[in-house]
Amino acid sequence: WKNPPRRVQVESRDNAAAQAKKPGARIGMSPEQVTKETGWRKPNHINRTTAAYGVHEQWLYGGGNYLYFENGRLTAIQN
């Protein structure tokens, strides 16, 4: 749908925020551990930066929830 009904958008955003706040993600986990062993699912989008120091990933979820990875390890949780 080009413009889905607002009710669907609100439910989707609320669901994403609730899912992202489930406990379990811990600093130092790999991306695979985060998605398989915790309440966090695969992100809506990943911003990836490769530089001399390594690879940085920002996983974007709805509701202002983010996970940050450096060289394949979780370094920060924002929600």
Image (cartoon, helix red, strand yellow):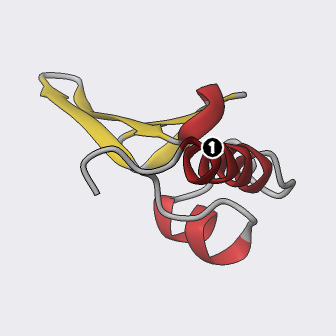
Q: Is residue 42 above or below residue 23?
A: below
Q: Is residue 53 above or below residue 67?
A: above
Residue drawn at 70 percent across, 74 percent down: 37
Residue bearing the label numbered 1:
13
Asked if residue 30 lies left or right of residue 47, the reply is right
Quadrant of the rendering where the N terminus is positioned: bottom left
Residue drawn at 74 percent across, 67 percent down: 38
Between residues 13 and 5, which one lies in front from this camera angle?
5
Question: Where on the picture, by quarter, is residue 33?
Answer: bottom right
Q: Is residue 50 above or below residue 17?
A: above
Identified by mark 1, the residue type is: Arg
Quadrant of the rendering where the C terminus is positioned: top right
SS at mark 1 in the image:
helix
Between residues 59 and 51, which one lies in front from this camera angle?
59
**Residue count near mark 1 (Cα–Cα under 10 Å), binned few <14, some 14–19, many ≥20:** some
Residue drawn at 41 percent across, 50 percent down: 4
